[in-house]
Each structure stands twice: as structure tokens, then as C-alpha cells.
Image: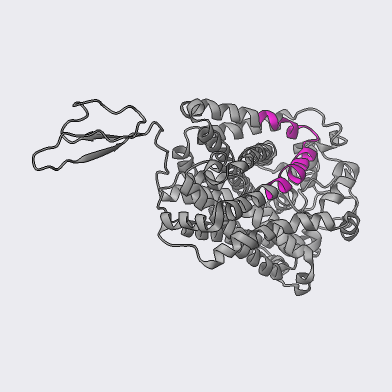
Amino acid sequence: MIASTPQGQGGAGGAAPEPGAGAAVPSARPPGGLRTLVVQQISSERPRETWSKKMDFLLSVIGYAVDLGNVWRFPYICYQNGGGAFLLPYLLMAVFGGVPLFYMELALGQFHRSGCISIWKHICPIFKGIGFAICIIALYIAFYYNTIMAWALYYLLSSFRPTLPWTTCTNSWNTVNCNRYMSTDHNVSWSNSSTSPAEEFYTRQVLQVHLSPGLHQLGSVSWQLALCLLFIFIIVYFSIWKGVKTSGKVVWVTATFPYLVLLVLLVRGATLPGAWRGVVFYLKPDWQKLLSTTVWIDAAAQIFFSLGPGFGVLLAFASYNPFHNNCYKDALITSSVNCLTSFLSGFVIFTVLGYMAEMRQQDVDTVAKDAGPSLLFIIYAEAIANMPAATFFSIIFFLMIIMLGLDSTFAGLEGVITAMLDEFPHVLAKRREWFVLGLVCVCFLGALSTLTYGGAFVVKLFEEYATGPAVITVVLLEVIAVSWFYGTNRFCNDIHLMLGFYPGFFWRICWVAICPCFLLVRPTYTIYTPRHHSRAQRQPTRTPHRHQRSLTPPGPAQSALFWTDC
């Protein structure tokens, strides 16, 4: 509301303007014939919260973008698609697809200072449903993503023992097929039916998946995992309940500690015998793979889900920035750190896989047949058990996994919270703590199905069918709405108003044409690629027993095989 009062009268002389009238009040003409108009800005809205420091914002974005997928998915995707040759399509997809989308969302959030729902009243109101879709997807992710942290917490607590429980075959959960395979053991016979203690600890003690025949009969909730998940959500609640003022401080630990651990594990892995075999296997380029469409599809999917546009998080975080903050530089810095972290994680993983191959006298590709969580919870856990000071490395490794997941959970829920508080400010603005508590409770209750004996199947179901295609569709509609309906010229004028310069021609052509094509590639390929063709190309290396199904989140090409086995 704008009200005008004559100078020196303070609004006391004459009739004061009606609230919201917006008209200037005539003032008495002082001697000399001059009069002064004083304009006072009166806003009924609460001032928007801002980050305490610029580093709070940068660490929050880096912590959100660098998650568990950087540690387990990128190394697997890289070696599966040509090793060092994969870096070429990966970087091209980052430059022409991932980073422009990343930059676009930061600029939108910072200019309009709104969450993913209310921002559409400034851009194109007919697309407001995108914001609600983003919130629903975020809830789906919270239902299963935090369960993986609960598994890691279970491992962390189990690490406080003189002997790690996944190193022996004398436990109550072990079977007759368990075969202890430590570096100190000699003349060990290993057959196709053999299983390692680490695999049985993961499948039979942590997940207890052998007690569930499948999705049609999930079984009871594991109370141990339920307590672990409850503890995770308690940490989440007290980290985000006050907003970015508190979460911005927590990320100074949760976003930096994983890098310290990665460096420690890299140095330790590089000193292990056989580490060079893993590095060569990781980086040796297979240029023929670049002729395969699948490699380019996997590169596009990896960079998209790694940077994370479309989840409402970048919009929310950027909305708490000062208006003239250089979000262009922030986008380049944070996306570069994310990509470099993925590359570094590959060395951390494959130096250890090379060591495992040397110890077992097998090829690296035989040891590295697993992807997803089993790469961490079986292969890497077994490798740690064979190291000196195994307990110490186990504790810091699983603590790192938990912190990588916590950052992403903070960000995902903050995206929902910001969206709802901006959309319903009169109802929720003064009740943030209670709303956050209710949201965390809903997420915990929604995650209970993933804590059952068949919970691993539910995690797979959520990841494959509830998030991936939906997020790609949402971001496709978002970039179309901004570039074609709101208009690229108008969007560039907004950026000029904030930053003082216009985006170059490269960014304009990416937003208008290249990014929509980038987002259409994977769903189009999935629709028109026969499922039987992908299944025929990917046969399992060994047929697992009924209680030893693969529980790793598959890549784009593994889901058909997994569901056939289930």
C-alpha cells in the first residue's frame, strides 16, 4: 500500500488517505509555492527470510545436488558405458542440458522469490499444477529415500563392535551357502551358489527380504529399521523446523564431512594392492560404446537426476537470496562441484573394487557386477572389513552415507515447506514448526511400507515408477512454460534486472530448443525401444537363489529384468 502525506504534517492535517487508496493527499502550499510529496511503502506481508551467509546457500545447494547417486550410480554408469569414453557424452549433456536447467531454476526462484506453487501466478497461472505435482513427487521420494539412510544407520550402529558382523558366517542369519572370503583366508572354494557374509548380512539381517515372497506379501515392519528411520526423521525435523537459518548452519557439517571422508577413503584405497586395476577398469575408454544410443540416454539421465532440477528445491533455495545475488556464478560453481564429486567418487569406489579383485583373484568386472545400494552395503562393506582398522573406516563410511542423504532430505522437504508457506501464508506462516512436524510425521508413516520384510521391493517400485518419469515430465512442462509462454525475452529481461547483464545466445537457444529435446530423449527412447530387446542384452551373471534376489536400484535398462525375477 502506498500512502502520501504532506511534509511536516505527518498525516495529521486534513483527511488521511484510506488504506489501499493509493492516492496522494494534497498538502498545504508552503511559502515559495513549493511542496514536497513523501511516499511511504506499507506492506502487509511478512519480510522474507534470507540466508545468513552466502556460503550457507552454496553449501545447501551442493549438499542437495551431491547425494547418494554420486557415490554409487555414477561410477557404475561410467564403467558400464565405456569408462573414460563416457565422460564425453556426460559433459556434453551437462553443458547443453543439465546446467541450463539448473541456471534457469535458480534465476526464477531468485527473481520471483516464491516457491514452486505460487511462482506460477507470476509466470503462467495455467501451469500452477506443476507446483502441486512437484510437492507430491517430493513426498514419494521422502517415503523411500530416507529408508536407505536407515539402512546405513543400522550398519553404523553395527560397526561399534570389535568384529564387524558381516565378516563371519557363524551368525544366526547365515545359511549353509555362506562362504567367508577374507584376505587372510587361503584355499577358499567359491562356487556359483556361494554367498559372502556381507551379502547375507544385507539381505537376511538388515532387509530380511527372505521373509517376503514379493510385493503381494510384504510382511511385518522391522522394528530395528523403524527405530533407525525415526531417529533420522528426528534429526531432519530439528534441522529444518526454523527454516534456512537453522538448516544453513547444519549443512556446514553435513555437506563438508562427506568430502573429508571421500579424501580419506581415496588415499586409503590408492594404497591398497590392486587399486590400479580398478582405476584402469574405471577409466579405460571404449570408444565403440559411443555409437550406442543407450550410452547417451544414460548420460542424459545421470546428469539430470544428479543436478536435480524439477524438485522445487532450487526454486526454494534461490528465493531466499538477495535480489541482486549473482545466481549465474552460483549455478556454474555448484554444478561443477557436483560433476567433479561424481568423478572423484568413481576413484574412491574403483580403487577398492580393484583391491577386491586382486584379493579374490578375479576380474574387476566380476567383482563390480552389482550397482546401487548393494555396491555400498555389500561390496564396499566387505572391502572395508578386509582393511586394517576396519571398524574406524566402517564408521566414517556409513556416517558419510547418512550425511549425504540428510542434505538431500533437508532440501527436498524445504522445497515442499516453502511452496506451501508461500501459497497459504495466512494459515501457515506463523505455524511453520507445527506444519513441519506434520509433514515429517506423514513422511515417516508413508515410509513404513519400505521398512517391511519386502520393503526393498517397495523402494524399487517408488524409484522406478513414482519419480523418474514424473520428474522429467514436470521439468519438460516447466521449461516450455518459461521459454514459450512466459517468453525467453521476458525471462532474460528479468535476469538483466537482477544481475545487470543479459544471458548470452547460448543460454537462450538451450532454454528454447535444446533443453526440451534433452528432456524428450529418454521417455521417447523408453517408449520405442522393445522391452524384449533390452532383456535379451542383459542376462544375469549368475542365477540367484530365491532369497538372494538382486536388490540394487537398477539403471534404466535393468528394471525389466528385476521385475521378471521378482
Does the magenta stretch mainly form a helix, a strand or a loop? helix
Of residues 51 and 343, the one drawn nearer to the viewer in this rendering: 51
Of residues 498 and 255, the one drawn nearer to the viewer in this rendering: 498
Magenta-highlighted residues: 444-472
Quarter of the view holding residue 13: top left
Of residues 402 and 412, the one drawn nearer to the viewer in this rendering: 412
Q: Residue furthest left?
A: 31
The answer to whether residue 271 is seen in the rendering is no
Quarter of the view holding residue 144: top right
Percent position of residue 443, x then y: 65, 32
As drawn, is 446 to the left or to the right of 421? right
User: Is 283 drawn above or below residue 529 in the view shown?
Assistant: below
Which residue is drawn at the image coordinates 58% and 62% (left, top)?
Answer: 340
Percent position of residue 39, x then y: 27, 39
Number of labels in the image equals: 0
Which residue is drawn at the image coordinates 32% and 27% (left, top)?
Answer: 18
Residue 360 located within the stretch drawn in magenta? no
User: Is 522 drawn above or below residue 287 in the view shown?
Assistant: above
The answer to whether residue 119 is seen in the rendering is yes
Percent position of residue 233, x then y: 60, 33
Q: Quadrant of the C terminus?
A: top right
Q: Residue furthest bottom?
A: 287
Quarter of the view holding residue 290: bottom right
Percent position of residue 399, x then y: 59, 44
As drawn, is 31 to the left or to the right of 382? left
What colour scheme does the image use? Answer: one colour
Of residues 358 and 461, the one drawn nearer to the viewer in this rendering: 461
Residue 468 located within the stretch drawn in magenta? yes
Q: Quadrant of the N terminus?
A: top left
